[in-house]
Amino acid sequence: MSIIAAGMISLMTLTAGLPDVMWLGEPTGSQSAVSHAMGGSGFTHVSPLGVLENPSLMGLAGDGLLVEFSAGADLLVEKRTRRVYDSFESSIGESEIAFNKEIGFFPAGAAVVLRGQEWLPSSLSLAAGYRVPSTFDYGYGRIVRDASYVKTGEEMLDISGRMNEFDMAVAFSPSEALTFGFAGGYLTGSRDVEWDVSWVDPSQEGTVAMRKESMSCVVTRGSLLFVPYRRVFITAGVDYPLSLSVSPENSGDPVDWNTLSDQDYDLDMPMTVRLGAIYMPGNLLRSRVTGEFNWSSEGSLEFQDISLGLDNSWGVTFGVENSLPGGPTARFGFSYRRSPIAAALDRMTFSTGLGFSAGDWNLDVSGSFSPDRWAQTQVSGLPSFVTGDSLTVEETETRLMFSVSRAFGL
Amino acid sequence: MISSLLLAACLGLTVPGGFDLNTASLQELQELPGLSHVQAGELHRYIYETGGLRSIYEVMEIPGFGPEELEYLRENCVLVPPRGGGISPQVMSIMERLAAEDGPGDAAVDVWENFLIRPIPVNAATSWQLRSLDRVSLVDAAAVEARLRTLGPVSSVTSLRDVDNLTYYGYRNMRDFVSVRELDLSSMEFFGSYRLVVDGGDGRFYDEEGLGAMLDGLRSAEYDILYGARGYSEADSLAWIGRVRDQREELLEAENATGWEHRVRVGLGDRFRGGVRLSRGRNSAAGFGVFDGLDLGSINDRFDLAKGFVSVENLGAVRQAVLGNYRLSLAQGLLVDNTDEMMYRSTYRSWGLYPDLTSTRQFAMVGGAMEVQAGPFLGYGFYSNASRDAVRSVDGTPSILLMSATRTSAYADAVKETSYGGYGFYDLGGFLSCGTAVGVGAMMVSYSDSLVPDASAMDIPGDATVWDCPEYDILEAGESSSFLGLSAQTVIDNVSFEGEIVRQDNESMAALARGRWQNDYFYLLGIWRRYDLAFNNPYNRGFAEQLRYDDTVFEKPYYLNDPLASQLARWPVPKPEEGIYIESRFQVSRAITFTKVYLDLWRSIPYGFDNHRFQGEIEYRPDFTVRFRLKYKYQEKTKMQDVIPTTSRTTEYTFRTFFLPTESDFFDVQLRLGMVELTPNPLYGDDRLMSGGYISARWEHNFSDALSVLGGTTLWSTDGMSQWEFEDTGIDFLDGDGTKFYVTIKNNLSDNLQLRLRVLRKDTFYPRTGLYRPDPEDAFYYQGDPDSPVRDFIDHATEYGIRCQLDFRW
C-alpha cells in the first residue's frame, strides 16, 4: 500500500497533481478466500464472486442458487531505514527511522449466481454482486528529532478509502465446450488523505492538510470459456473500463499537494487482457490447478496528452487445491506481478488456505504474504521524508480473508 | 472393450455383465437402479476428480455409499483400474533427492533423470558408464562389468546384489538407473521435460560475497578516489571513478531482480537428445547479450544465460556426440572439468561427457564434443569457442579471467576463449582385471587477446598495504596454454587405484593419486595431491582443501583498484597445495557406524605453511526410527596476513538427531557449536577468540505420496565466527545473530506434473554500538546527510525468499 501512497504523493508533489493509475488503490486481487489462497486470481475461480471477474465461468457452475460472502483484513508493516557509513565510506548497516503498522478491514464482496431454473433458458446463467476491487489504507508516522536526538515534533500521513464495484453478469453456453460471458459494473469510491505535522515548541505552528477525491467509472468485461478436454478448461477475457471521473476537494492548511486544482477531470483507464486455465489432474487428492496470465496497457495512459510515464505491466498467478485425506481442503499458490512504475516494485506473493464443508455450507479461510523492498534511488519521484539519498523501504503485506458460500437447490 | 473385460476379470475385481464404472457417463450411472440420482452424481464426481476408482472398495469413501451400494456395484458393474503414468512416484522421489543433495553436478543430474526414465541396459554396460552414476565407485562399476564378462547377462537387476565386490551401497545407488532392457535403436519414442523456476522475494543480502557487499565496495571506492586517498594520477582518477560509477549503476539494476528459468529437454528413443535453457539468476545483472553477436532485443535484458544442445547417441562407435553446450569431466579432473563450482574435499565426480543446461557460465563450453568407443578404446574429443569474463586494467587490457556472479560491462565477455583437446583411454580389462585402464589427454586453451597479469593494475598505489599474492604474481602474460595429461587406474578385487598427472607448457605440474578399499561395512580412501604454484589450468577441479585465491588479497575488495575484482576469490581452481587425505566409513554393528572420519594434512605451497584438518562422525541407531550423530572437527591453518602469518585453530561440535515418530513424519534436530582461536596480531587488536553456533530443527510431514510439507527453523548466534548449514535446497551462511524459518510444499499433481513451492524468512541482527567518535573526521554518518548524528542502533536485516518450481515430464 505504501507504494501506492508514495506514488500518489510523489506524482502530486513532483508533477503538479498529475494523477496516475494509482488512483485506484491497492488491488485486492481476489474477492474470494478460495482464489486468494490459490495465488489471488479470481479469474479462474468458479464461484459467485469469481464470475463477476470472469462471467464465462458460469458455464461450470452447478444448477440452483449460489451465494457467497467474503471479507478480509490487511496488515501492512513498513520499515524505513537509512544507511550508515563509517569514515572509510563503508556501510555498517541500516538504521531504522520509521516503523509503521496499519491494519485495515474490508468487505471483499457478496454475490449470487442463478442457473438451471425453469424460467431461465438452460444455456443462460445470471449473476449479480458487489465487490471491493481495491482499497486505500496507509499510515505513516515519524518522530522528528533535532541534532541532540531530542524530540521536536511528529509527522503523520493517513490515507484511507476504498473502491466499490456493483456488477451484473450473464453467460451463454451454446455447447458444453464453449461459454461466453459478459459483465458490466459501476465503480465508485473515494480516497482521503490527511497530512499532519505538529511541533513540541508551542510557538511553532503545526500543519493539517486534507484532500478527498471521489471517483467513479463504468467497467465492462467480456470473456469466454473453452473446454478442449474434459480435464482442461481454458478461459480468456478483457476488462475494459471507461474513463474515470475524479472530483477532488481540498481543505485544511495549504501545502504543496493540497493546493492542487480542485477541478473535476476525467482519466482514461488501462485495459487488461487475461488468459487463464484450470486443470483437474484426477488423483486421489482431487487436485485442482489454476493459472492466469494477465497484461495491462498502463504504458499508453495519458493525462491531458502527456504520457504518465508508466510501462505496460503483466502478472502470473498459479494455485493448487488438494483435498487432504480425511481432512479439509488445502490450497496454496503464488503470484508475480511486474510493476508499471519500476522494476524494484515488482512483487511476489505466497498464499495458502483451508476450506471446510458442512452440509451445503462452505467456509474458506486464506492468508497471503508479500514482501517488498526498494531504495529511494530505484524509484524516481518517491518522497523520502528525510534528506539524503539513502532511504530504503522494507515492507510486508499480510492479508487474511474468509468466505462463506452456500448452494441452494431451488 | 473385450480387452478391458479380460483385464478386469484377471484382476478379479468385477463381475461380468456391467459397464466400466471409471469410463461411465453420468447418464449411465443415473440409469443404474441400485443408485439414486444423488449417489450417481457423487460417484461420477469422485471418479472424475480422483482419476478413477483403483478398487471397487474405494466407493466406501464416497459420502452416501455403504455396504449395500458396494455389493450392488460389485454384482452389476465392471471396474478397470486407471492406468498408471509413465513415471512412477518412486522415480519422482529419486529425482527429488538428486536435485536436493549437495555433491552431484547439475549437468549429471539431468542425465541421471533421463536414466531413471530410460535406464541403462545393464547387460551391455561398461564400467565407464556405470561409474558415471551418482555415488557408484570404480570398484562397484568394475565388479558389475567383471560379472557380466565372466557369467554373461543377468536376467534381473536384483541378481546384481550377489555380485562379488559390489557393495550394497553401490548396488543401491546403481539399481534405479539400470535395467535388463535391450537398447532399442529403432524406437522413436518422444519424451522430455519442461521446468519453470521463479525465484524471488525481497530482502537484504549483505553476506561477504553478495551483491550488497559489491555495491558497498564500489561506493567506498568511489569516495576513496574522490578524496584522493588512492594516490592515482589525475588521468587514472578520472578513469577509475568512471569505471566504478558505471559498474555501480549497472549493479543497482540487479537489486532484488527476480530469477527465472525455462528449461526444456527432449529425447527421441535411445538416439537423439536436445535441450534449451533460458534463465536469469536472482539479484543478477542482465543486458550483456545471451548469445554473442546476436541482438535479441528485450530477451537480452530479461535473461542472462542461454544454453542449448543437440546430441546423438549410440551411432556405431560414436557413443555420444554433442553440439552446443556440454560438460566434460574426465579422469581426476586435473586436465578438464568445466564446472563453475569446486566442492571442497569432494571425493565423487560426475565422470564423463554430458549435454549442459546448467547455470554454469564462465566455464561453459560451446562447440562440439564426442565420445567414441571401439573395442577397448574409449576416446573423447572436444572443441569450444566461447566468451569469457576477465578483469580489465583501466586501459582496457584483460589481465586475468574472472568468474563474476555480478557481471558488469567492464568484465563481461572480455575475451574469446578457444579450447580443444582430447582424452583417450585404453581398457586393459581384457587381460588384466576389469576396471584397469590407462589414458592420455591433451588440451590447448587460447584467447583472442593476450592476458596480461599485472599487480600494479590490481593494487591501489597509495594505500598502506603491501601487495603480497604469489598465486597471482607467478602468472605469466600470454595468449595460450597447453596441457598434457596421463592417467591410470586399476581394480584388484575390492581395491582400486587411480591417478592423473598433468603438465602445463610452462613446465608446472599437477598430480593426484588415490586408492580405495571397500566392502559392505567399511571403506578406506586415501588421496595424495600436489598442484604447483605456476600450474594455472582454468579447468582443473582436482580434489583440494582451498580455492586458488582463498586467503589472499582478493578476499578484500578495499585492497583492490576495482573492488569487483575480488570475485576472483571464487575462482574454482585448487590452491597450490600438497597433501594427503585419508577418509573412512566403518559400520561397527547394526547400531553403531562411524559415518565419515577423515584427516587431511596439507601444505600451502606459496608460503610453505603446514595445515591439518580432522573430522570424525559417529552414528548411533538404537532403533530404525531414531538416529543420533555426533561430529567433531578440528582444523589448524596458517595464512599470510599483512606480512605476519596468522594461525587459526577451529574446533567444532555438531550433534544431530533424526527420528520418525510416525510413518508420515520425519524430524531432524541439529546443534552446532564452534570456536576459532587466532594468533594474536597487533593489527587486529585483541580479537583472538571467535565463536558461533546454531540450533536448527526440520520437520517433514507426508499427507500422501503426492503431497508433503517441509518446515524448518534455525536460531543462531555468532561472535565473529560465521556458520553455515545445509537447507533442503542449498547451503546458507549465517552471520550476526538471528533466526530463520522456511516452508516447502512438494506436490506431485500427477505422474507428469510436479510442483515445489518454498517460502523463507531470515532475520539477522547486527548490534552497532560505540558509534560515538569525538573526531568529526572519524565519525559515522548518514549518506547525504552528514550533519545528522548517528546513534547506536541494531541493524535488523530481513530477507524473504519465494521460489516456485514447476516440472512437467512426458
Image: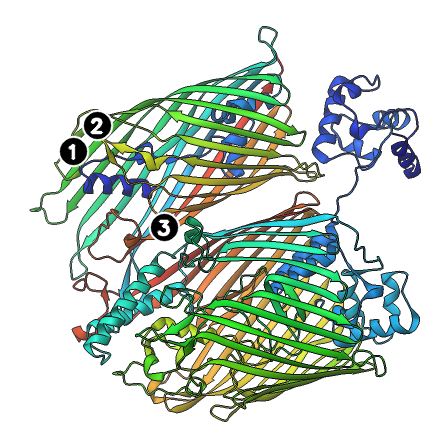
Quadrant where the N terminus of chain A sits is: top left
Residues tagged 1 and 2 counted as in contact (Cβ below 8 A): yes
| Chain name for mark 2 | A
From the viewer's perspective, is the residue at label 3 or at label 2 nearer? 3
Q: Three-letter amino acid code at disc 1?
A: Leu
Q: Is residue A207 above or below residue A271?
A: below
Residue B566 falls in which quadrant of the image? bottom left
Residues tagged 3 and 2 counted as in contact (Cβ below 8 A): no
Give the distance between the C-alpha atoms of the residues marked 1 and 2, in whole angstroms.
9 Å
How many labels, in total? Answer: 3
From the image, tell me which residue sits under label 3. A344
| Label 3 or label 1, whichever comes before in sequence order | 1
From the image, tell me which residue sits under label 1. A260
Residue drawn at x 72%, y 72% as measured from the top left: B620
From the viewer's perspective, is the residue at label 3 or at label 1 nearer? 3
Q: Secondary structure under badge 1? A: loop
Tell me where residue B157 appears, x and y as whole percent: 85, 62
